[in-house]
Amino acid sequence: MTADCLFCNILAGNIPCQKLGETKTVLAFSDINPQAPTHALVIHKTHTASLSETNENQLLGELLGGARDVAQQLELGDYRLVINNGAAAGQSVFHLHAHILAGRPLKWPPG
Ligand code: AMP
Ligand code: ZN
């Protein structure tokens, strides 16, 4: 728990979220500003600031596998998984998270 971290506060129950799924290691909830009909965020229960700031491959496996399991449970069909790494890449919350986007055609390349 990092006291000034938004997602740690969601994990602690101090800030509400619309929960979509949970395992021993990850939590999935709806993005407050959805960019697709389904826009879920998947976070690990252990705080780490960003993808490039962790060497914990087990944590990364749990995050990626958790995202796959949530997508399967929600029966999303095709979906996009996004990790923004660093402010210039669009990261605004520095608790590592994966976005799951689904429910509309998704163009490539992204903006
Ligand atoms: P990123 O820009 O990749 O760091 O993603 C952070 C995401 O968190 C953004 O898509 C925000 O819309 C989302 N977000 C910010 N505050 C909340 C919140 N309280 N509950 C759910 N999602 C949030
Ligand atoms: Zn955190």
Image: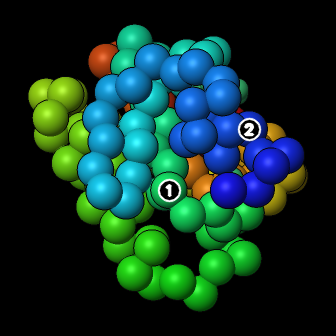
* Image region (quadrant) for ligand 1: top right
> Is 109 drawn above or below residue 83 in the view shown?
above
As measured in the structure, the alpha-carbon distance from the residue carrying label 1 to the one carrying label 2 is 13 Å
Q: Mark 1 sits on what residue?
A: 45
Name the residue: 20% across, 48% down: 69
Q: Is mark 2 within 8 Å of ligand 1?
A: yes
Taking the image as shown, residue 17 lies to the left or right of residue 37, namely right
Disc 2 is placed on an element classified as: helix
Disc 1 is placed on an element classified as: loop
> Is 2 drawn above or below residue 76 in the view shown?
below
Q: Mark 2 sits on what residue?
A: 6
Q: Is mark 1 within 8 Å of ligand 2?
A: no
Front residue of this view, candidates 50 and 47: 47
Specify which label sits upstream in the sequence, 1 or 2. 2
Q: Residues within 10 Å of mark 2 (few under 14, many from 20)?
A: some
Residue 15 seen from this side: yes
Picture mark count: 2
Residue 108 seen from this side: no
> Is 99 drawn above or below residue 16 in the view shown?
below
What's the amino acid at mark 1?
A: Lys
Q: Can you say which quadrant of the picture contains the C terminus? A: top right
| Rendered location of residue 86, percent (x, y) | 80, 58
Name the residue: 59% across, 87% down: 55
Taking the image as shown, residue 59 lies to the left or right of residue 96, namely left
